[in-house]
Amino acid sequence: MSAFAGLVEQLAELLEPLFHASAAAAAIVLFTALVRLLVHPLSRAAARGQRARTRLQPRVAELRRKHAKNPEKLRKAVLELHEEEKVSPLSGLLPGLCQMPAFFLLYHLFSSSTIGGEANGLLAHQLFAAPLGDRWADALGDGGLLGAAGLVYLALFALVAGVASFNYWRTKRMTAAGAALAAASAGDAGQPVPGLAAITKVMPFMSFLTLFSVAVMPLAAALYMVTSTTWSAVERARLYPLNA
């Protein structure tokens, strides 16, 4: 933890001539971008895996028809198909899993009053008027919704809402297209894919959960979340074009 705190401090010192009192906040944004850049090859691999799984849907539907009365044979047949085509069902999870250690380190760093037995100096850093170790509730209690710190959160909420709306629109179109393809593939069997209708309805709204996260996390962790979510929106727009 001390080494990670030192890294954030060093990045903040490098950025201080440009960002002054908000240098630590800028360091968090830069750190997040570096993490996402390192994970980007996994995101590209996940996109290739998603395209491969989409291509295999007619063959999976055929296996579902063939083994409709034997779930165990169906499971083995699908696994063999994925292995034969070198498609990993878990590839889409890897980018998120690889980011979790960095996020939890940052969350713990700005939730701890001491580091290595000494006072955590990072908690004194701010994003404009909002301390990086505070939460939205602290901002509401110190100046209210339209106070100096409250306005910082309102700006973050506006950014997250914009990104979430963009993700909502894209996810709604992609899940609808995926559902139509799955239904067409399984049409001869007359069997809907289990749970597909529920997933299609719920998935577009998942993007708005980030609003809740920003409201309850320390501002530093919320800043990581906002930066990462914005990066994801741009990255997915490039890797998963709607007209593909």
Image (cartoon, grey):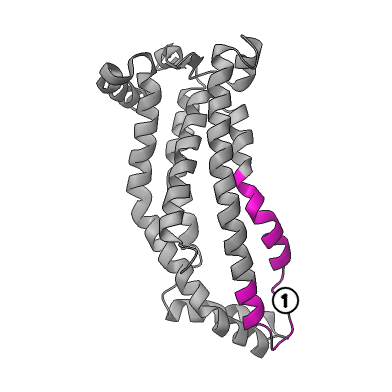
Work out whether 215 lies above or below 235.
Answer: above
Q: Is residue 23 left or right of residue 202?
A: left
Is 185 magenta? The answer is yes
Instruction: Let me know if residue 97 appears in the view.
Output: no
Q: Is residue 114 left or right of residue 165?
A: left
Q: How many marks?
A: 1
* Residue plotted at (35% across, 20% down): 23
User: Residue 53 appears at what percent x and percent y?
Assistant: 50, 73
Where is mark 1, residue-wise? Answer: 192
Residue at 57% x, 32% y: name it: 158
Crowd band around label 1 with a 10 angstrom C-alpha radius: few (<14), some (14–19), many (20+)? some
- Residue 66: where, in percent of width, then height? 65, 90
**Quarter of the rendering occupied by the N terminus:** top left
**Residue 65 higher or lower than 174, as above or below:** below
Identify the main secondary structure in magenta.
helix
Q: Secondary structure at mark 1?
A: loop
- For residue 163, above or below residue 217: below
Identify the residue shown where x is 36% and y is 39%: 33
**Region rendered in magenta:** 180-207
Q: Position of residue 28 (x, y in %)?
A: 39, 29
Residue type, label 1:
Pro
Q: Is residue 74 visible?
A: yes
Q: Is residue 134 magenta?
A: no
What is the x, y in percent for residue 224? 46, 34
The quarter of the picture where residue 117 lies is top left
Which sits in the foreground, 160 or 50?
160
